Structures are given as structure tokens and as C-alpha cells.
Amino acid sequence: FANTVVGSAALSTEDTGRYNTAIGASALETLNSDQDNFNTAVGYQAAQGNSVSSFIQTVAIGAKALHELTTGNYNVAVGFEALEETTVGDYNTAVGTYALKVNVNGDRSTAIGYGALFYQGPSTAANADYYNVAVGYFAGQNINTGVQNTAIGGFAAHQLTTGSYNTAVGHSALGANT
């Protein structure tokens, strides 16, 4: 099946998926579906999943990156615990330690920087199309249910929780708005 596996329990439940790469203890551990193809996980428990998991074209690099993912496609997580709590989600990009960490069921967001969009979508509701973008140290940190926000700069929109359609550019821009 052309899979590459290095590490204890890495890719240990997959039986038919192809072209997957799992490097590190428990990387892609619970991946198991006929369509699970072209996934890459590097790091301790990267994309481990918390039950029988199914996803395609997903990249997780860093310890516990995409750790809880069970269903989702086309996600990219680079950094320690990036997108860690995402269980269901598609088309997300998180680069940086704790970027999009608590994004439980959110889709289509981009977080670049330490703690960017840290608290987005901590709910068990059906997939939500957030379309949030945050670039910078803790940019958009507390955005919870807000949609279509852009935060660029350290702490930009970091107190914003439910607001939508905002643009914050610069250090601490929109810092007090919720």
C-alpha cells in the first residue's frame, strides 16, 4: 500500500489506506478507512485521533498536532499542539505552537503565530465555516464563535469573542472589542 511508518503504534490500525507517512510514536495511530490516502504526520501523537479516524490529504507536523482529529480533510498543522483539539474540520491551516488549538468543529480558518485563534470554536456543534484569519502572536486568541474576522499583528483582536466581519491590523488593534 506504499505507506511509510516509523515509530511505536504509528499507523497501527490502517489496513487499506495508501501513500501515508507516519513518523513518531502513535502518529496516525487510529487512521483506518478506505479513502485515507496522502496523509503525513511527524511527531509524537501527531494526528493520532481519538477513535477510528478518517481523513485525506492532511499534514500534521509537531507533537500532538491535530491530535484529536477523527474526520477532516485538507488540514495543515505545523507546531506543538497546533489544531490539537480539532475533532471534525476541513481546510484549516495552523502554523505555530498552539495555533487554532481549541478549534473543535471549525472549518476554513488560517492561524499563523503562537496561540493565533487559540480558542476558536470550542463547541460540539456541526461544522462551522468560520473563515477567520489571524497572523501574529496571540492574534485573534479569544475568537470563539465570530466569523470572517481578520487579525494581523501581535495581540490583534485578542479579546474579540463573538464579533464577526472585523479587520484588525497592528499590535493590539481592536484589543478591547469583544
Image (cartoon, grey):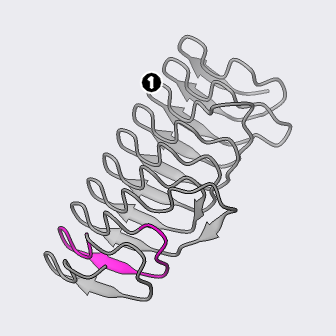
Residue at x-position 56% and y-position 68%: 108
Q: Residue furthest left?
A: 171
Q: Is residue 145 magenta?
A: yes
The main secondary structure of the magenta stretch is loop
Residue at numbered disc 1: 44
Closest to the observer, 93 or 87:
87
Where is 59 relative to 29, above or below?
below
Specify the quadrant that holds the C terminus: bottom left
Specify the quadrant that holds the N terminus: top right
Left or right placement of residue 96 versus residue 48 in this view: left
Where is 104 relative to 22, above or below?
below
Left or right placement of residue 73 versus residue 122 in this view: right
Q: Is residue 45 magenta?
A: no
Residue count near mark 1 (Cα–Cα under 10 Å), binned few <14, some 14–19, many ≥20: many
Left or right placement of residue 155 versus residue 49 in this view: left
Residue at x-position 61% and y-position 29%: 28
Where residue 20 appears, as percent x and y from the top left, is: 66, 34
Quadrant hosting residue 140: bottom left
Quadrant hosting residue 168: bottom left
User: Magenta residues?
Assistant: 144-158
Left or right placement of residue 172 versus residue 148 in this view: left
- Dot 1 amino acid type: Tyr
SS for callout 1: loop
Residue at x-position 76% and y-position 25%: 14
Where residue 132 appears, as percent x and y from the top left, is: 45, 74
Where is 31 relative to 155, above or below?
above
Closest to the observer, 171 or 46:
171
